[in-house]
Image (cartoon, rainbow, N blue to C red):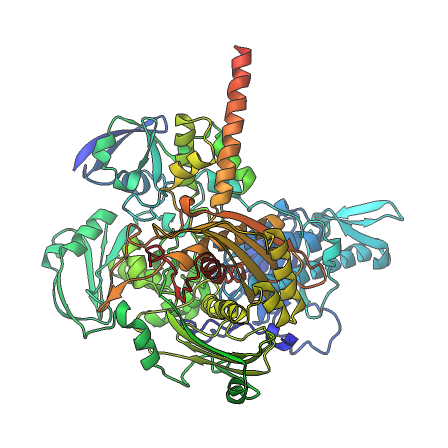
C-alpha cells in the first residue's frame, strides 16, 4: 500500500451533494462588535492570495474577512478563549479533544476555552462531521490557529516590553520574560486591541512527544450537565408559544396520494398544512398533533417494490454502472487476474452479503423552527448544519444568509443524521402556524423515513499458491459502497470493482460505511484461504501483508488475545482487521457455540488500534469499546425487514440492538504512534468485529457464515 | 381533560391534561423537565426511566393518571442541592457516556437497582440494566460506574453507621 492510497478518504457516497461555496456571515468589524476587542486568529483554508508572503499577515482595520476560512479563535479582553468551528458534537467527544488541542498550543487551561460549534451564523462553513475527518483536519487546524495566536501574543509582549521575542515564552495563560523576571497575562495583552491575524503558513506546533494537555485523558466537556439531565439536546429545545408538529406519512415508500380528507383535523383546533406532497399539522401538544394526523383519511397508491427475500438478486440485476457520484475509486486493475487465476494452485470463489441496517440513534431526528419575517432559524440535530441550511434555503427559496441553523450537542448520529427532514417539516409548519414549531420523530418514523446503511452483495474470486502466497484477487461489490474496498494484502494481480445499484430503499452514510461489508468479505475470505492451504490464520495474513502499521495491530491484538492457545469444545477463535479512515485495527474474537440450541455467544473481543498520536486516551478507549459493541449488532442480528415499500420491523421491540446482556469482555490495546499525525477513531474500530466473529464461529463449528447478520436466529442446528 | 396532582422531586404540581397522556409527555411538555428522554415510546430503551414510589418505571408507557399522588423522582431530583447523587458522581468520574442521551435513564435505573440491592454483582447489574439501551455502546463503563457508586454508597452508609 502506498502513502498515496492511504491518505484518500472516500467522500460519503450517497446523500452528500457538492458542498456549498464557502461563506462567512460576519465582517471583521461586526465580529469585534459581537465579541468585544481582543485578538482574532483565523485559519485560511486556501491561502492562495497570500501564499507568497512569509508567515502570517495582519489585515487592515475594517476590512472584511476572507471567505475561505475553516476555523477561528478569539482571545477576549478577559482572557477567555472562544474557538469557532463548524464541526459538531454528537457523542464522539470532539468538543473535548479539540479543546485539548487548543489548550496545548495556546498554553491556556481547558476551562478558559469555549468551543462554539455548528452554528451556521457564527462558525465557518464546514461540510459536515463525518468520515473521521475532525481529528486529522480540524484538530490540526485548531492547533495551528492556537499556535499562531500564541505567537501573536508573544509578539505583542515583545513590542510592549521592547525586547526580542526570542527571550519570551508562553505558559499558563501568560507571556513570561524570565531573564527580567516579568510576565503578563494574555488578557492584559489583548486589552483594547482589535487584531486580526491570519494563519497562512505552518506555525511551529508542539510535537506529540512533548504534549502536556493533549495526549492525556480529559473528561467530557460539561459532563455535569449530562449526568443531571440539564443538557438541552435538539429535542429538548423550546420557545415561548411553541407548537408541536406532526407529519402524515405515506402508506409505503414512493407512494402517491390519491385522496385526502382533513376535515376532522381542521375541527380540532390545529393548523393543517397540505402543500405539494407534504401533509402535516401543528398543535399545542404533541398528542393533539398526533391525534389530528391520525384523524386524516388518506389513500395512497404505489407500484410493487422489492422485499428482503429478493434483495440480493435485485442488487445484482439493477446495477447502474458509471453513474457513481464520486466518479472515481470504482474500479482498480493491476496485473492479469485471469491469467493468475488459471495458473493458481487453489482457486476460491465465494459470495458474501450484508443486509440493510438502521442507525437507531437514541435521540430521533428533531427540529425546532422559528420565522422572523423571511428569516428562518432552526435548532436541529444533524451532522451537517450547513448542509441542512442549504436544504432549507432550497425548500423555501431563500438565500442562505436568511437561514440560521444551530446544532445543540445531540443524541448521536453514527452517520445517520446528515439530512434535514425534520428541519424542513418544522419550518413548513411554523410558517403556516406563524408560531415556532417543534417536530420530533417517533422511533417508527426514524426507522422508516430516515435512511439505512446500504445492503450489498460481494463476490470474491481468488487464486493462491500452495505455499500461501495470494496471486489473484477479484472483488465485486454491488451497492454497499467502495469504502475499504481495496485490499491491503500484497497481491500482484487484482480486479476490484464497485457496482452502484438503483437501490430499493433509501440508503446513506453509516459509521465506517461500506468498510464494514468490504472487510467482512475480505477478512472472511482470507480465513477461507488460510484454511484451504492449512495455514494458521495469523501466519497466513502476515505472510501476505507488508504494511507495518497493520502488521503491528494484528500482532498486538494476537499477543493480548493469546492467539494459538488451545480451545475447549464449542469454543472458537477468529480475527479480522484492516485500515480505514487512516486508522489501523485488528479485532480478535472468542465465541462459544452451543450446537444443540444454536446459541452463539461472543465471549471476548480484543481490539488493537493505531491512529497516530493519541489525543485523548480515555476518549479513544471509549470510542473503541463503543465500536465493538455497536459492531456486534450488525455482525450478529441487526437487519431491516421490508416488503413492498414498507418496513416490517420499525420498532425497538422488533429490531434488536446490542444490550447489556450481549456484552462480551472487551479489551482494548492502544498503539500510540507519537511520530504519526493524529487521525480519527470513530469508524475504523468497527470494521474487524464482524469478520472476527464469523471466523471464530467457523473455528468453533466448521460452519462458514457468509451473510451479515450472522446469526439473527442463532446458528441453524444441522 | 382532567386536573391531575403530581408529586415530583419533592414539589407538587397540578396539571391539566388528558389522563391517558404519558407521564413522559407531561414531564417534558407541561413541566419542562426534559432530563427524561424519549427513545422508543414502548418501554424498550429505558431513556425515559423515572422512579415512582421507589421503583423504576418507564415514563413513556405510564399513564399520568396512574401516578397521581405518588412520589415521582426524575433525573432532575436526585442531587441534593449542588451535591450530586453518588450514581451521578460515579458516571461523571468514570466517563460512562458518549452522547449521553441514555444517561438520565441509565442513572435512574441504577439508582433504583442500588435501592433494591446495595451490593449487586456484575451479572445482577447486567440483568437489571438490560432494559436500558446505550447505542454508543458504553455498557462496560456504565457497569463500572454502578459498581463504583455501590462501593461509595456502602462506605458512606458504614461511616454513618459508625457515627450512630
Residue A75 sits above or below residue A403 on the image: above
Foreground of the two, A642 or A184: A642
Point 39% across, 54% down: residue = A361
Q: Quadrant of the N terminus of chain A?
A: bottom right
Foreground of the two, A553 or A404: A553
Point 64% across, 65% down: residue = A551
Foreground of the two, A148 or A534: A534
Q: Pinpoint residue A2: horizontal percent, then vertical percent.
A: 64, 76
Q: How many marks?
A: 0
Point 47% across, 50% down: residue = A569
Specify whether A400 is left or right of A180: left
Q: Pinpoint residue A76: horizontal percent, then vertical percent.
A: 64, 51
Specify whether A485 is left or right of A420: right
Instruction: Name the quadrant containing residue A415.
Output: bottom left
Task: Specify the farthest residue to the right.
Answer: A179
* Residue A42 in view here: no
Q: Pinpoint residue B123: horizontal percent, then vertical percent.
A: 44, 36
* Residue B25 in view here: yes
Residue A88 sits above or below residue B81 on the image: below
Instruction: Name the quadrant containing residue B32.
Output: top left
Q: Pinpoint residue A365: horizontal percent, then vertical percent.
A: 35, 56
Q: Quadrant of the C terminus of chain A?
A: bottom left
Amino acid at each position: 500500500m502506498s502513502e498515496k492510497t492511504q491518505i484518500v478518504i472516500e467522500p460519503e457516497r450517497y446523500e452528500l451533494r457538492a458542498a456549498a461555496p464557502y461563506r462567512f456571515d460576519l465582517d471583521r468589524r461586526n465580529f469585534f462588535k459581537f465579541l468585544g476587542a481582543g485578538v482574532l486568529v483565523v485559519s485560511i483554508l486556501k491561502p492562495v492570495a497570500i501564499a507568497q508572503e512569509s508567515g502570517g499577515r495582519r489585515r487592515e482595520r475594517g476590512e472584511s474577512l476572507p471567505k475561505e476560512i475553516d476555523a477561528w479563535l478569539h482571545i477576549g479582553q478577559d482572557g477567555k478563549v472562544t474557538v469557532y468551528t463548524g464541526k459538531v458534537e454528537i457523542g464522539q467527544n470532539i468538543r473535548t479533544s479539540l479543546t485539548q488541542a487548543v489548550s496545548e498550543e495556546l498554553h491556556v487551561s481547558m476551562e478558559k476555552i469555549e468551543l462554539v460549534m455548528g452554528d451556521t451564523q457564527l462558525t465557518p462553513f464546514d461540510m459536515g462531521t463525518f468520515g473521521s475527518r475532525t481529528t486529522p483536519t480540524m484538530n490540526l487546524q485548531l492547533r495551528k490557529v492556537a499556535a499562531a495566536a500564541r505567537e501573536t501574543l508573544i509578539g505583542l509582549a515583545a513590542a510592549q516590553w521592547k525586547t526580542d521575542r526570542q527571550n519570551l515564552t508562553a505558559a499558563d495563560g501568560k507571556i513570561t520574560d524570565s531573564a527580567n523576571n516579568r510576565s503578563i497575562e494574555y488578557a492584559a495583552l489583548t486589552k483594547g486591541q482589535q487584531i486580526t491575524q491570519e494563519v497562512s503558513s505552518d506555525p511551529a506546533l508542539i510535537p506529540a512527544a512533548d504534549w502536556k494537555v493533549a495526549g492525556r485523558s480529559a473528561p467530557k466537556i460539561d459532563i455535569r450537565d449530562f449526568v443531571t439531565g440539564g443538557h438541552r439536546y435538539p429535542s429538548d429545545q423550546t420557545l415561548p408559544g411553541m407548537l408541536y408538529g406532526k407529519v402524515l406519512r405515506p402508506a409505503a415508500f414512493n407512494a402517491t396520494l390519491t385522496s385526502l380528507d382533513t376535515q376532522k383535523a381542521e375541527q380540532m383546533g390545529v393548523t393543517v398544512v397540505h402543500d405539494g406532497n407534504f401533509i402535516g399539522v401543528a398543535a399545542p401538544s404533541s398528542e393533539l398533533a398526533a391525534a389530528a394526523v391520525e384523524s386524516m383519511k388518506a389513500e395512497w397508491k404505489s407500484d410493487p417494490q422489492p422485499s428482503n427475500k429478493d434483495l440480493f438478486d435485485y442488487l445484482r440485476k439493477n446495477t447502474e454502472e458509471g453513474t457513481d457520484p464520486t466518479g472515481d475509486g470504482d474500479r482498480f486493475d493491476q496485473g492479469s487476474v485471469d491469467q493468475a487465476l488459471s495458473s493458481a494452485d487453489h482457486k476460491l470463489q465465494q459470495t458474501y452479503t450484508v443486509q440493510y441496517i438502521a442507525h437507531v440513534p437514541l435521540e430521533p431526528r428533531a427540529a425546532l423552527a422559528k420565522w422572523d419575517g423571511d428569516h428562518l432559524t432552526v435548532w436541529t440535530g444533524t451532522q451537517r448544519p450547513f448542509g441542512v441550511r442549504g436544504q432549507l434555503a432550497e425548500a423555501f427559496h431563500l438565500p442562505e444568509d436568511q437561514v440560521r441553523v444551530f446544532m445543540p450537542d445531540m443524541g448521536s448520529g453514527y452517520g445517520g443524521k446528515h439530512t434535514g427532514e425534520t428541519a424542513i417539516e418544522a419550518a413548513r409548519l411554523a410558517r403556516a402556524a406563524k408560531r415556532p414549531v417543534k417536530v420530533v420523530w417517533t422511533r417508527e418514523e426514524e426507522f422508516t423515513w430516515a435512511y439505512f446503511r446500504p445492503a450489498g452483495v460481494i463476490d470474491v474470486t481468488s487464486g493462491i499458491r500452495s505455499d500461501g502466497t495470494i496471486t489473484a484477487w477479484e472483488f465485486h461489490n454491488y451497492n454497499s459502497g467502495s469504502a475499504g474496498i481495496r485490499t491491503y494484502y500484497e497481491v500482484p494481480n487484482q480486479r476490484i470493482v464497485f457496482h452502484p445499484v438503483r437501490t430499493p430503499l433509501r440508503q446513506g452514510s453509516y459509521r465506517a460505511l461500506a468498510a464494514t461489508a468490504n472487510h467482512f468479505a475480505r477478512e472472511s475470505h482470507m480465513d477461507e484461504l488460510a484454511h484451504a492451504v492449512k495455514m494458521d490464520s495469523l501466519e497466513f495474513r502476515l505472510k501476505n501483508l507488508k504494511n507495518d502499521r497493520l502488521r503491528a495491530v494484528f500482532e498486538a491484538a494476537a499477543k493480548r488475545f493469546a492467539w494459538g492457545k488451545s480451545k475447549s469444545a464449542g469454543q472458537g477463535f477468529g480475527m479480522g482487521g484492516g485500515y480505514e479512515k487512516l486508522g489501523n485495527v485488528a479485532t480478535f474474537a472468542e465465541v462459544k457455540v452451543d450446537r444443540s440450541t444454536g446459541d452463539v455467544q461472543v465471549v471476548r473481543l480484543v481490539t488493537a488500534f493505531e491512529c497516530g498520536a493519541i489525543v485523548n486516551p480515555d476518549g479513544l478507549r471509549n470510542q473503541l469499546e463503543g465500536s465493538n459493541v455497536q459492531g456486534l449488532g450488525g455482525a450478529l442480528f441487526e437487519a431491516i425487514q421490508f416488503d413492498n415499500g414498507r418496513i416490517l420491523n420499525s420498532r425497538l421491540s422488533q429490531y434488536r440492538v446490542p444490550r447489556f446482556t450481549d456484552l462480551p469482555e472487551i479489551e482494548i490495546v492502544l498503539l500510540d504512534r507519537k511520530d504519526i499525525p493524529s487521525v480519527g477513531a470513530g469508524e475504523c474500530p468497527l470494521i474487524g468485529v464482524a469478520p472476527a466473529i464469523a471466523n471464530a464461529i467457523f473455528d468453533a463449528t466448521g460452519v462458514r457464515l457468509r451473510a451479515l447478520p450472522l446469526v439473527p436466529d442463532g446458528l441453524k442446528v444441522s | 381533560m382532567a386536573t391531575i396532582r403530581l408529586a415530583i422531586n419533592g414539589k407538587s404540581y397540578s396539571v391539566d391534561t388528558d389522563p391517558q397522556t404519558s407521564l413522559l409527555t407531561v414531564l417534558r411538555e407541561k413541566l419542562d423537565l426534559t432530563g427524561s428522554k424519549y427513545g422508543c415510546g414502548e418501554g424498550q430503551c429505558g431513556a425515559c426511566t423515572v422512579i415512582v414510589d421507589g421503583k423504576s418505571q418507564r415514563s413513556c408507557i405510564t399513564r399520568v393518571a396512574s401516578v397521581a399522588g405518588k412520589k415521582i423522582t426524575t433525573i432532575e431530583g436526585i442531587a441534593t442541592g449542588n451535591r450530586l447523587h453518588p450514581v451521578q458522581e460515579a458516571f461523571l468520574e468514570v466517563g460512562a457516556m458518549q452522547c449521553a442521551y441514555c444517561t438520565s435513564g441509565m442513572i435512574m435505573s441504577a439508582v433504583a437497582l442500588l435501592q433494591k440491592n446495595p451490593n449487586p454483582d456484575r451479572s445482577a447489574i447486567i440483568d437489571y440494566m438490560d432494559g436500558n439501551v446505550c447505542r454508543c455502546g458504553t455498557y462496560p463503563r456504565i457497569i463500572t460506574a454502578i459498581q463504583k457508586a455501590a462501593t461509595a454508597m456502602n462506605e458512606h452508609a458504614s461511616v454513618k453507621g459508625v457515627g450512630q
